[in-house]
Amino acid sequence: MWNKEKNIVRTKDAVDGSWVYRHAPLPVRPYLKLARVDRPVGTWLLLWPCLWSLLLASDGVDFDLALIALLFAIGALVMRGAGCTYNDIVDRDFDGQVDRTKSRPIPAGEVSVPGAWLFIAFQCLIGLTILLQFNKFAILVGFGSLFLVAVYPFMKRITYWPQAWLGLTFNWGALLGWAAIRGELSLTPILLYFGGLFWTLGYDTIYAHQDKEDDALIGVKSTALALGSHTKHAVAVFYAFFVISLIAIGMLEMAGIIYYTGVAVAAGQLTHQILRVRIDEPDSCLNIFRANIGFGWILFITLIIDKWY
């Protein structure tokens, strides 16, 4: 499935100094790359809606909640990895034609397609083991995301809005987190889910601007191509819808001043992203995309403090 004598190519947008290239054993490096372990931002972006939802659903912060959060963190890591592996199998011909993605393990020849399928099965087994630790309703909710994951790689072939489908997929944890605590769903997690959709639509539109020239040449569609020079204004609208959903959640949950102060700070961070991003500079787009990890921390810490006080 891979050649030991071959150097493992560093993925173009990997985190500088990633431990994957410095410390991971050579035989597993291509698979860690395939799971995007060298680019952890996606795992954070998948995990944040889960953690926000857990905190909103809980009565307080305690050891049991921390244990559930740990399970979600492991689940986010392996299921994001499985989703990326599946995406790379489906998109292997496209990836080989795009400068940023041609160094991915499958087009680079580091992992075979059969090897990638086996790796998906391994990751999904871990994810299933974690999901089975929750209540029956949460298990059903978890399985509900599989259709979204299976269809996502094909959306860029049929619509200029694949980022919206990614939003539906990546924010499923907003529903699952609440279900894992409460055993049911209510308006709060639904608002968080659809609000998160607009958050993803914003940050992934910025991310897509890295590939817009290659995408246009090979026929791949994206919101970056659809919105073009109007991207900043559109992202401002997307982020505004997300902030409005957070305010509505605060009203539903009868949150206090701590919550609204944190939401205001988080909104300021999103505004800063829009002001700073330069959509024609790939490095700027990547840095602003990664800044959403910090946004997630702001909201996460806000919810923890709100629960304490």
Image (cartoon, grey):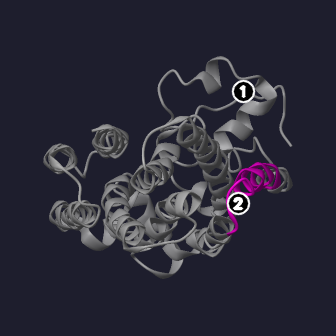
Q: Main secondary structure of the magenta part?
A: helix
Q: Residue furthest bottom?
A: 158
Q: Secondary structure at mark 2?
A: helix
Q: Amino acid at mark 1?
A: Asn
Q: Amino acid at mark 2?
A: Ile
Q: Which mark is residue 108?
A: none
Looking at the picture, tell me which residue is in the foreground, 297 or 133.
Answer: 133
Labels 1 and 2 touching (C-beta < 8 A): no
Disc 1 from disc 2: Cα separation: 21 Å
Q: Nearer the viewer, mark 1 or mark 2?
A: 2
Q: In the rendered image of this protein, does residue 227 appear above or below residue 20?
A: below
Q: Which mark is residue 89?
A: 2
- Drawn side of residue 296 relative to residue 32, left or right: left
Q: Residue at label 1?
A: 7
**Mark 2 neighbour class, 10 Å CA radius: few under 14, some 14 to 19, many 20 or more:** many
Residue drawn at x 18%, y 60% is 232
Would residue 77 be counted in the magenta stretch? Answer: no
Q: Quadrant of the C terminus?
A: top left
x and y percent of residue 199 in the render? Answer: 32, 60
Q: In the rendered image of this protein, does residue 118 appear above or below residue 25?
A: below
Task: Say how many tags the image has.
Answer: 2
Which residues make up the magenta segment?
A: 121-136
Q: Earlier in the sequence, mark 1 or mark 2?
A: 1
State the image quarter where residue 8 is shown: top right
x and y percent of residue 135 in the render? Answer: 68, 62
x and y percent of residue 284 in the render? Answer: 28, 41
Q: Is residue 113 at all visible to an observer of this figure?
A: yes
Residue drawn at x 77%, y 25% is 26
